[in-house]
Image (spheres, grey):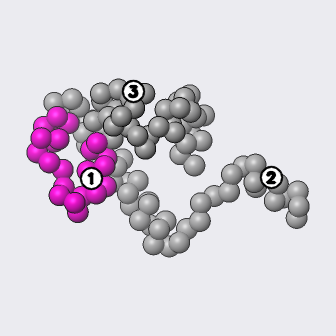
Amino acid sequence: MHSVDLQNGGVPLRKIFSVTTWKESSFYSKREKLALELTERITLISEGGVPQELWTRVRNEFSEREVSDLILLISTINVWNRIAISTLLETPALEEQAGEEQLTA
């Protein structure tokens, strides 16, 4: 779902697919890697929270507005993920699959 939106927005497929290896990937800028690191620590908040050292790097790199926007975005996505998981929401079908199902109905 999100990968389709990113691709439609012009993000290269190699970059989208390498998100699981963002730490090692050369496709991400310093700021993107920092935002992904913050995302990981907030998402896994029960595993120790956001370390002071990370928070300091985030505050040095991003403006106050950018930090608040990042935290809001990360938190919103986490809430939607928890709603989807707890309600057993199914992933929407791919457009190609949806079209094929209509043809066979």
- Crowd around label 1: few <14 · some 14–19 · many ≥20 (10 Å): some
Query: Residue 102: x and y, percent?
Result: 84, 58
Between 40 and 71, the one nearer to me in the picture: 40
In this rendering, position of residue 20 left or right of residue 64: right
Tell me what residue is drawn at x 33 percent, y 37 percent: 23
- Crowd around label 2: few <14 · some 14–19 · many ≥20 (10 Å): few
Tell me what residue is drawn at x 38 percent, y 54 percent: 76
Q: Mark 3 points at which residue?
A: 26
Can the viewer see residue 72?
A: no
Query: Of circles 2 and 3, which is in front?
Result: 3
Q: Mark 1 points at which residue?
A: 42
- Crowd around label 3: few <14 · some 14–19 · many ≥20 (10 Å): few
> Disc 3 to disc 1, how far (Cα)?
23 Å
Between 66 and 78, the one nearer to me in the picture: 78
Amino acid carrying label 2: it is: Gly
Amino acid carrying label 1: it is: Ile
Q: Name the residue under label 2.
A: 99
In this rendering, position of residue 67 left or right of residue 7: left
Magenta-highlighted residues: 37-59
Can the viewer see residue 58?
A: yes
Marks 3 & 1, CB-CB < 8 Å contact: no
Query: Residue 57: x and y, percent?
Result: 17, 34
Per the image, label 1 sits on a secondary structure element best described as helix
